[in-house]
Amino acid sequence: MAVNNAPREIKGMNYKKSNIIIGAKYKSTIYENKLLAAALYSLQNAATDKNGDIVAVMPAAQLKEIFGKGNSIYSHLKPVAASLIGRSIGIEDDEKKEFHYMTIVTDAEYKDGVCTITFNKKLKEKLLQIQNKFTLLSLPVMMDMTSVYSFRLYELLKSEAFIGNRSCQMTMDGGFEFYIGLSELKLELGVVDASEKKVQEILNGKQKPDYDKAVEVATEKSYDEWRDFKKNVMDVATKEITQKTELDLSYETKRTGRGGKTSGIVFRIKRKDVEEKVDVTSEVVEKKITDDEKYELIDRVKDLMDEKISTKDIISILEVAGYDYEKVKKQYENSKSAKKIGNIVGWMIDAIKNDYSSPIEKRGKNANLFNSFQQNEYDYEALEKALIDN
């Protein structure tokens, strides 16, 4: 049976991120990026505005998606929040000879199991009133990332800021490709710390900064040799982005000089055929639940299922069930008595939609559970095709 590895697009858990923020060059960790993503999602779905401040409120249940169950939220959150306070962005207009540098986050607090992030009020237009020049990102997809380089590269590939500043060309297969210098890419991904004073002096206010020189003077940098950068950054990020997102990503190097030194990267990107979320609005009435309750349900389903299921697939199952945990639990218990299941996520979606009956309910406790499950010649390939077509 052919298995479709295209990721499922999750509607309803997206957030907007300004391309100015995406395009800012800074060194960061995967946890910083995930915390900022969760804060932006919370901000744009339930912003609190006190005395002109822009505040995102995240309960501990939501933070579990960042740091993982079983880990101390407090001990993990403290250094991440502290480092996020120091992140700044620069808004530049070389034609008008204007620039404005500012911090993104001005205050971070964790108290009584709730994290509160206060954004710079001067960024209100870039955070809450984004009319254009933003990138729409899926929170479950970003939370599934394990490498900070995958996270940052995916944002950059998706953003108009990244694409618009370069000479992009459409390819024959409907994708596109573009070139970026190796030194600039290292600064974009945070492999080289762009916040150092000497680096800032080279980058700031320049229409065409000397990125090679900026990388050369930097004291905090990783993977100086191409082979190390390729192994630990490029190959890791390319594999994770291709596996976990809607983008099929590949690249090739460009070399210059006598020794054929790698000087730049040509990215080739093609959008996969993405399974659209099954529309069940006419079949079930979705419960009105808060984001906090939604995260709690995701955790409960993760604990329920023995299989390792991604967050976005769990959300798909919950959406079909109208966020009714008992429906999910019932069909998962039924799955234990079913015949061989090739795709547990697809099976669960169909079982919930069609309300499979338990073999015990149908035939009594003495029935042969393995053979009597009410599937009626269930066709897994047809299900996968139906999920794709829908």
Image (cartoon, helix red, strand yellow):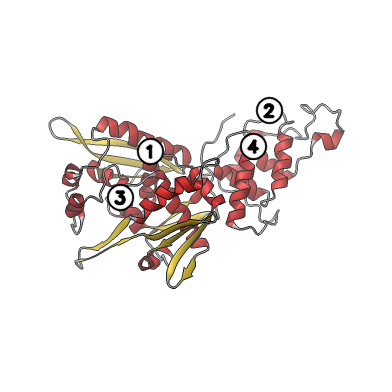
The one of 9 and 388 positioned closer to us in this rendering: 9
Q: Quadrant of residue 292?
A: bottom right
Between marks 2 and 3, how big is the CA–CA gap? 49 Å
Q: Earlier in the sequence, mark 2 or mark 3?
A: 3
Task: Answer few, some or many: residues within 10 Å of disc 2's Cα (few below 14, many 20 plus, some between 14 and 19).
Answer: few
Q: Which residue is mark 1?
A: 237
Residue under label 4: 305
Q: Does dot 1 land on a helix, a strand or a loop?
A: helix
Q: Nearer the viewer, mark 2 or mark 4?
A: 4
Q: Is residue 308 left or right of residue 136?
A: right
Q: Residue at x 55, y 40 (%)?
A: 70
Distance CA(mark 2)–CA(mark 4)? 16 Å
Q: Which sits in the foreground, 83 or 203? A: 83
Whichever of callouts 2 and 4 sits on the residue coming sooner in the sequence is 4
**Residue 40 image point, x, y percent:** 45, 57
Whether residues under marks 1 and 2 lie with C-beta atoms below 8 angstroms apart, the answer is no
Callout 1 touching callout 3 (CB < 8 Å): no
Q: Quadrant of residue 368?
A: top right
Q: Which residue is mark 2?
A: 340
Disc 4 or 1, which lies upstream in sequence? 1
